[in-house]
Amino acid sequence: MRSILLVGLAAALTVACGGDDPSGLGAGRGSSGSSGSSGDTSSSSGSSGATSSSGATSSSGASGATGSTPADLCVNVINDYRKTNNLAPLERWTDGEACADGQAKSDSETRKAHGAFGQCGERGQNECPGWKGPPETMIPGCLKAMWNEGPGGGHHDLMATTKHTKVACGFYTTPQGAVWSVQNFR
């Protein structure tokens, strides 16, 4: 398990990754040594103040990437980083987004990154657990931290992989405002 601890102005934030990638990433392993749990795979929304990627609207971000939803932004930022290594862009895996939203919600409830890994048919996963939101402002920073690990860093290697051709980004915002985001690779 590779984790990177980022100390921000107001809080320490953890980034985690998992998958069956040969770089040593493991399914069900998360930050702080946490491991799997089963979770809800449905999209989330409701009166609790929680939101999913399907409920969010306009966004903009670092690296010149923009999108009309956090999921657009997420895919665009990943592809902007891939472009710096002359890698083909990943296709947005829209059919996997509702399931990824459910994984983010499940992981937020169990407080275990990658607790729902594998439930969406993904072969690799990065996760931004409990970042301060909203999604459209936290995702560029989280993805930048992952990319900045460089070659040999599990998050970076999954973002730069040539084994996968698609990515689905899922989001869940807790009633307290913490954003959990998974990026599922297939």
Image (cartoon, rainbow, N blue to C red):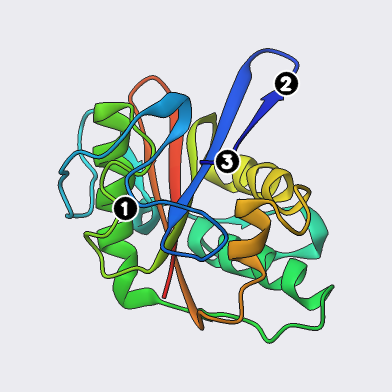
Q: Amino acid at mark 1?
A: Asp
The residue pinned by badge 3 equals: 2
Viewer-nearest residue: 133 or 30: 30
Q: Write the residue at 45% across / 46% down.
A: 181
Task: Calculate the distance from the C-alpha at mark 3 to the C-alpha at mark 2.
Answer: 19 Å
In this picture, is 49 found above or below 51?
Answer: above
Res 122 quadrant in image: bottom left
Residue 48, disc: none
What whole-number distance in Å separates the C-alpha atoms at marks 1 and 3? Answer: 23 Å
Residue 5 against residue 147 in the figure, above or below? above
The secondary structure type at the circle numbered 3 is loop
Q: Secondary structure at mark 2?
A: loop
Residue 35 visible in image: yes
Q: Earlier in the sequence, mark 1 or mark 3?
A: 3
Mark positioned earlier in the residue sequence (2 or 1): 2
Seen at 25% across and 28% down, the residue is: 110
Left-right relation of 50 to 20? left
Badge number at residue 101: 1
Q: How many marks?
A: 3
